[in-house]
Amino acid sequence: MTAEWLQHLGDLQFAPPAEREAWLAAHPLRAFLQDQPVGEIRRSDMNAFKPPKAGAQHRMIFRWKSGAMFMNVRLPSDLTYKGLSFVDVGDDPRRYVIRFETDQGTITTNRQELSQTMVVFGPGAKPDEEEWRRRFLSMRNVFNVPIDPPEMEAFVSRHLGKVEPDNWGEADSSLSVPRLSANPLAVQIEGLGAEDAADIDAVLDRFVNDLDGHLTGASGAVIQNMRDFAGAAYRDPDGPPLIGASRDDLFEAALAVTEPDRIWGHVQPYLLRIRRDGYPDDPPAEQRVAEGPIYLTLISHCDWETEHGLGMTWRDGAVLSAVGDHSVRLEDGRAP
């Protein structure tokens, strides 16, 4: 804590409550390493990581510096935060010990545990205040030493030729599917290795051999995706469309489609993504999942959503399980 902090806090003991509140709101609780600010607890807007408007409802966040970037983590808002400190315990920044002094005692954690406990992703991932509090108070400064991933072997696929995954099981390839595109589709493989080669080919067999059936089966959902987007983009008839929407002739023509199979004239596929269910975004080696279905996602440009495009996912290359934009996730496509 700096001398400026100590001086002001001493003066503010006798200041009017409104003045003390205003100064503290403008000066977040900060922690330093080698005289450099590395983290702070501050108030934030309820829906975005930015300062709240005066008098507005707010939440609490912990903001820390990671390289040239700042990371934000939501904290429980019903605790009183009295102190914050960082302790450098080695070369790996993930091991930095972080201590939060609160009215419920001292919570000691590290950046790895904090990220794994308090950063929540996925559709519908909106824990309530009680869950944030439970997560925060559960931290015990547990650090799991990362394990280097195993070296992956190259393999040969009947459809893709030679595939050379990196140590995370990720690889790039291409596939010619004239029914979908005059140019070969880019292929991204995620979390798969030589032991999955037969499964990859089986998934591609099922998808390519009944491609017309898969497209026909997806037509209705694709048309609904277009209409949902059109409704969102134009919900204010007197206002501008959302970013990515365009009131051009191509969009109007797509909206006029009445025969489901004709919608594919407004879709331009360019990428296939092949991924095993259970493969996390940034997994330690021991978390790779060798079981579970393989999902094949077809990513396309489309005439109605020029910014985010269209994404369609088939489980095991056979069962349509999700339709959305280009970021459609496996979680969206799991069977209920």
Image (spheres, grey):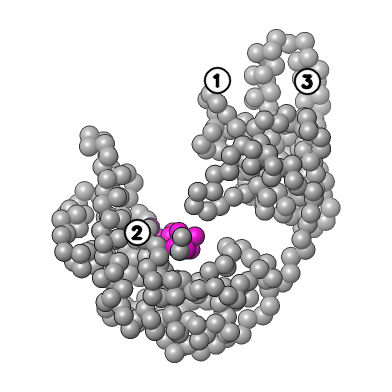
Q: Residues within 10 Å of mark 1 (few under 14, many from 20)?
A: few
Spatial CA distance of label 2 from label 1 is 40 Å
Quadrant hosting residue 211: bottom left
First in sequence: mark 2 or mark 3? 3
Q: Nearer the viewer, residue 336 or 216?
A: 336
Residue 221 rendering spot, x and y as whole percentages: 30, 60
Spatial CA distance of label 1 from label 3 is 22 Å
Q: Does the magenta stretch include residue 273?
A: no
Quadrant hosting residue 314: bottom left
Q: Mark on residue 309? A: 2
Q: Nearer the viewer, residue 9 or 139?
A: 139
Residues shaded magenta: 325-334
Spatial CA distance of label 2 from label 3 is 53 Å
Q: Can residue 299 be seen in this view?
A: no
The answer to whether 86 is drawn above or below residue 167 in the figure is above
Q: Residues within 10 Å of mark 2 (few under 14, many from 20)?
A: many
Q: What residue type is labelled 2?
A: Gly
Q: Is residue 29 visible?
A: yes
Q: Residues within 10 Å of mark 3 (few under 14, many from 20)?
A: some
